[in-house]
């Protein structure tokens, strides 16, 4: 007989992802449906990632969550929606040898405890919500024995945070905006796995680890409401770039890849500036990094490094190979020496062997 004294746990780890064709703007705020498709690269899990342990026990009196050791509220609509979507798909969990069983119907009464850790600054434009919600959804889906595939789980993670849907897969991933009003086809689709283009090295320069001033959610809402440029971007520019980017990734065509990534980052920040009141995510250091990379790429005649900036000043740079990544680090260290009031906090290298 199974008493009340048991606890079942699952731990999962999910890396963050960096968009090379950006998501910015929703057509449905509550379902989190975007106005354009986006493409990202998922980082190596040994670096920027979230680790989440979810547990269930009859002794738990309510759902609770801790983020980096501090209790946080689960009352927000996004958490509630993810929990509801997962609970409604929960299945029997059974271990015959141990005589242990949780029946499908029991999941409605049981409460979960969730403990999540980020190994990088939260809300500093390093896509912490992406890794966070992807990991939350994935670990709860394992705990409750969901039968859904990664694509279907990505549609649940999307309702936690849009960019989270892309972290369910490794390698290069497309978030298809979808056509349906219920969001069922607004899901992540793996383009190529992490082995397809393994010469690439991602370097993240942490310009500032402070929390950003404008959240992505409110920033993109303001952009959709006030920017005349955003509709042109979503309808005319991005659909073409998605097709070109998919082709560049498939062909490992670094020149096209770098050109599209840099242009798309710059256009994203241009629509932020076109928002009323204007949104500034990059700072002087970010601008100096762009100049450094642009000058270098021009002097070589062909791009060596692609840069991209999200909703914060930190730079993600993608070097075409390991040799270029080493040179990039040398240049960064020369221009932003770490000692004496450095305006760069640290460098994170998205490749453990460098
Ligand atoms: C992206 N960003 O594609 C873009 C580029 C930031 C700049 O996705 O409201 O935190 O939770 O769906 O996912 C950040 O937006 O916003 C983001 P919500 P999210 O990575």
Image (cartoon, rainbow, N blue to C red):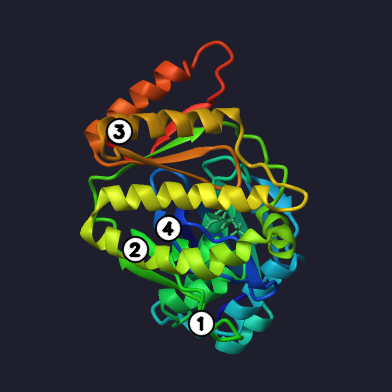
Q: Are marks 2 and 3 in contact (CB under 8 Å)?
A: no
Above or below, comparing residue 204 to residue 248 in the picture: above
Residues under labels 1 and 2: Cα distance? 50 Å
* Image quadrant assignment for residue 157: bottom right
Q: Nearer the viewer, residue 42 or 329?
A: 329
Q: Which residue is mark 4?
A: 40
Residue beneath the point at 43% across and 76% down: 151
Q: Look at 51% across and 51% down and name the residue there.
A: 50
Name the side, left or right, on which 5 lies relative to 172. Answer: right
Residue with the mark numbered 3: 325
**Residue 339 versus residue 303 in the image, above or below:** above
How far apart are the alpha carbons under marks 3 and 4?
20 Å
Element on which disc 1 rests: strand
Mark whose residue sits in front, 3 or 1: 3
Residue indicated by mark 1: 101
Q: Position of residue 343 (x, y in %)?
A: 57, 22
Q: Which residue is mark 2?
A: 244
Label 1, residues with CA under 10 Å away: few <14, some 14-19, many ≥20: few
Q: Earlier in the sequence, mark 2 or mark 4?
A: 4
């Amino acid at each position: 007989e199974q008493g009340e004294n048991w606890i079942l746990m699952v731990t999962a780890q999910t890396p963050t992802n960096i968009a090379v064709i950006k998501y910015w703007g929703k057509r449905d705020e509550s379902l989190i449906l975007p106005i354009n498709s986006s493409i990202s690269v998922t980082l190596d899990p040994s670096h920027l990632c979230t680790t989440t342990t979810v547990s269930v026990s009859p002794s738990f009196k309510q759902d609770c969550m801790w983020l980096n050791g501090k209790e946080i509220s689960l009352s927000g609509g996004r958490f509630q929606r993810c929990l509801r979507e997962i609970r409604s798909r929960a299945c029997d969990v059974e271990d015959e040898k141990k005589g242990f069983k949780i029946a499908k119907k029991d999941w409605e009464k049981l409460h979960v405890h969730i403990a999540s850790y980020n190994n990088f600054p939260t809300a500093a434009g390093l896509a912490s919500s992406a890794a966070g919600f992807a990991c939350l959804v994935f670990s709860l889906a394992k705990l409750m024995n969901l039968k859904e595939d990664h694509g279907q789980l990505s549609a649940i993670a999307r309702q936690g945070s849009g960019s989270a849907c892309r972290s369910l897969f490794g390698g290069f991933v497309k978030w298809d905006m979808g056509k349906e009003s219920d969001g069922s086809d607004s899901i992540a689709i793996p383009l190529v796995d992490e082995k397809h283009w393994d010469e690439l090295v991602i370097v993240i320069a942490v310009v500032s680890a402070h929390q950003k001033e404008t959240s992505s959610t409110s920033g993109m809402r303001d952009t959709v409401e006030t920017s005349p440029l955003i509709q042109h971007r979503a309808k005319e520019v991005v659909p073409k770039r998605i097709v070109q980017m998919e082709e560049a990734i498939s062909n490992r065509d670094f020149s096209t890849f770098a050109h599209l990534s840099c242009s798309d980052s710059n256009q994203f920040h241009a629509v932020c500036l076109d928002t009323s009141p204007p949104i500034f995510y990059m700072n002087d250091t970010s601008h100096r990094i762009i100049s450094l990379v642009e000058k270098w790429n021009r002097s070589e005649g062909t791009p060596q490094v692609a840069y991209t900036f999200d909703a914060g000043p930190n730079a993600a740079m993608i070097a075409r190979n390991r040799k270029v990544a080493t040179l990039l680090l040398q240049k960064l260290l020369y221009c932003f020496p770490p000692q004496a009031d450095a305006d760069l906090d640290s460098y994170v290298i998205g490749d453990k062997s460098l």
